[in-house]
Image: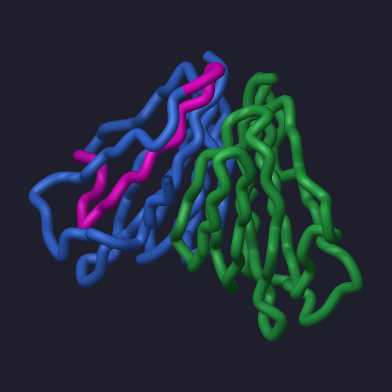
Chain colours: A green, B blue
Amino acid sequence: MKTNLLHDLPTYSSHEIFQTLLEQDGVRIERIVSTGQSSPPGFWYDQSQGEWVLLLSGAARLHFAEPEDVVELIPGDAVHIPPHRRHRVDWTHPDKPTVWLAVFHGG
Amino acid sequence: MKTNLLHDLPTYSSHEIFQTLLEQDGVRIERIVSTGQSSPPGFWYDQSQGEWVLLLSGAARLHFAEPEDVVELIPGDAVHIPPHRRHRVDWTHPDKPTVWLAVFHGG
C-alpha cells in the first residue's frame, strides 16, 4: 500500500515522466521526474488549476511572467502557483534526477 | 513565495507541530513535524477526510486496524489513508525530526 517516490528513478530519459499518484475529490497528486529537461523556448504553462509543487530531489529553476520572477528550488522547497499564473521551467539539474511532487486543485 | 519544508525544524518539541501550507478547493496541505511522538496508547485516528501522506525526513511506523497492518516509512514513502480507515502512529524516530507532508481531501 505504500510507494516510494525516490525509488525507481531513471538516470536519463528523453522526456519528463509524469505519474498520477492520486486523483480524487477534485485533487490530483502527481510525481514528475525531470532529467535535465526544461520548457521549450518561449513556452509558458497557463493552467486552469492551482498547482502546489514541492521539490523532493535534484534542483530546478522556475520562471514566472507578469510579474516576472525567477525561483531557484532545492529539495524541500515548495511553491504555490495560482491558476493562470504563467510559468515555465527554465532549468533542471542535468546530472541527477529532479523529482517534483505536484498537487493540482480546483479549476 | 517559496517555503522550505525541511528548514526551521525543532530538534525537540514536547508535541507534534502542525502547519497548514495550503487550504483551497477542498484540499488542505499540512506539514507535520514529529520529534519522537507517537499516538497515545489505544488512540486511533478515524478521519472523515482522505489523507495522502508522504514522509520527507526521519522515520515512522504507521499502524492500521481492520485489517491490521503495520507500515514502516522512510523518506520518499507515500501512503493513502481512505476516510475512516482507522490508524495510529506507533513510532517516530527519537533522534531526528520526522517531517510529514499530508494532503487531506474530500469528506
Quick one: B103 or B3, which is closer to the camera? Answer: B3
Q: Residue at x 74, y 71 (%)?
A: A8
Residue A52 position within the rendered picture, expressed as x and y whole percent measured from the top left: 56, 40
Q: Quadrant location of the C terminus of chain A?
A: top right
**Residue B6: quadrant of the picture:** bottom left
Residue B34 magenta: yes
Quick one: A6 or B36, which is closer to the camera? Answer: A6
Residue A46 position within the rendered picture, expressed as x and y whole percent measured from the top left: 75, 35
Residue B50 sits above or below residue A58 on the image: above
- State which region is magenta: B24-40
State whether residue B70 appears in this view. Answer: no
Residue B8 magenta: no
Q: Residue furthest left?
A: B14
Q: Residue furthest right?
A: A14
**Residue A17: quadrant of the picture:** bottom right
Q: Residue at x 21, y 71 (%)?
A: B95
State whether residue B75 appears in this view. Answer: yes
